[in-house]
Image (tube, rainbow, N blue to C red):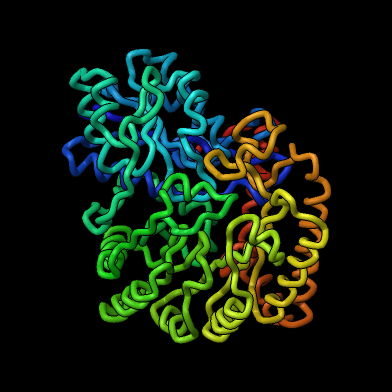
Amino acid sequence: MALVTLVNPNLMVQSRDRFTTGVVYMPIGLAYVASALREAGLEPQVIDAFAAAPRQARLEQGFLVLGLRPEEVIGELGVESRVLCIYANQVINHLSVVALIRAGKRARPELAVVILENTQAVTAYSLQRVASDLFAEGADYLLSGEAERSVPLLVRGIVRGDSPASLCASLEGVCHRDHPTPVRPPAPIGALDTLPFPAWDLFPLENYWGLGFAHGPLSGKRYLPLLTSRGCPFACGFCVIPATNDRRWRGRSGESVVAEMAAMQARFGVDEFHVEDVNPTVSEVRTRELCRAILDRRLRVTWKLVSGTKVETIRDEETVALMAEAGCRYISISPESGSEAVLEAMGKSFKRKHAERIVKAMRDCGIRSQACFVLGYPGEGEADRDATRALLRRLTFLGVDEVALFIITPVPGAAIFDHFRGYASLSDLNFTPSWRQDYATLVRFRLKLYALFLWWKWLRYPGRVLWQGLNFLRRRFETKMEMIPYRAWVYARLERQARNGVTKGG
């Protein structure tokens, strides 16, 4: 009997930009919550509104919405379910979260609706900054911070009939519409090795794999995400992670990570793992420990750092070589800007010479590399963008395989959140913020810089450009830039079907 139902919301794609939006993130945070509930004797029902029907599409408020309709999700709820937990996975999907809250309360007013925070993604958002909005839509509880310890206690308390005041007073990170500020702030979990592995058996994995694309470049037919660490010690002004993790970084042991890899390989036949940590290489000792654990167990796996890492924490060429030997095939780094003034304003340090050494080492070891930049930070001017162009040119000639250019958006919880106005919905707070007054200027620069990158790469590494084209054709992606055009093509086809009134299930 499932007393609690966990729901992953729909995937929302901004219709005017299918290249930057529409990233598929497997809900690893929700899979951890499911395993915590199971370990506590509360077997959950899981409904993945997106992955249950990833090719079922509709158009709403300028977005292509993929997956089940809200009424279909609520129609699948078990009759015995007393608690509905909705995962606020990415800020762009906020409209789907709201639609699920409304549908749940409309069909089952007695349900306790709990919103769970995603603390381990830079594209997520702080629930405390949007609490009034969520309560106004009908949410009963918000659970901020990592949920594994609190959610089983919250579910049992709700089922017992405990008062909201007592639950808020006793549980970390919990607040209620009548008590909207947590009495006990969330505390990041320290002993990550004690957590059970994510309960992926409760999710429609085949539907994720059947898409043929992912957040990270998908080389094989099957993959799973990994969280080998949580949090980040840095305080970048555009990022939500300082607010959701209190600038605390915590790492799992190499043995724990390798045990999870081996278990998922044995159970699901997965050999490719996408590391979704926001900063996985903070500890050089742990990075080397993980690599040696993979090698000692002779585990034949491929793993990729797909969400980015601070390049300064990869200390030297020897570490890069060890990572490659252990199966690492992709690393995303985040210079963010070529302008020292902008880096200082956002609170981010970047050691250019060190980054150049590591990029060259990755090229020499066969690890594909990505460099991420953000454009339009408050105070950025033309000279700052020129500096970014110069840095990207240098990194391209040293061997960076791809570039990602994001236009700054004010994610709720980030230090710059209150610096912007003009968006209609929280779902508009994605990396293509067309509501910004300077959007036209920034998007022209972004497109020009992408074109320059491809030209510079062709001049220096024409063979690599041709090889990436071949990867696109055979759909064995080594970089995101090879994969994204295919994803955009799929979304364009689904949007045409939606406009013509054609629906297609998962």
Picture layout, residue 234 above or below residue 362: above
Residue 131 visible in the displayed image: yes
Q: Residue at x 81, y 62 (%)?
A: 383
Q: Is residue 68 left or right of residue 190?
A: right
Q: Residue at x 58, y 51 (%)?
A: 237
Whole-percent x and y of residue 482?
64, 64
Left/right placement of residue 106 relative to residue 403 reads: left
Residues 504 and 96: in front is 96
Q: Percent position (x, y) of residue 70?
A: 48, 25
Q: Name the image quarter holding the N terminus.
A: top left
Which is nearer the eye, 347 or 208? 347
**Quadrant assignment, res 149:** top left
Residue 360 point in image, percent of width and height: 60, 83
How many marks the image carries: the answer is 0
> What residue lies at 65% left-to-right and 44% top-to-bottom?
409
Q: Left or right? Give the position of 487 relative to 306.
A: right
Where residue 206 appears, as percent x and y from the top left, is: 41, 50
Q: As rendered, which of 134 and 496 lies closer to the eye?
A: 134
Residue 47, visible in the rendered structure: no
What residue lies at 32% left-to-right and 58% top-to-bottom?
268
Is 22 placed above or below 251 here? Answer: above
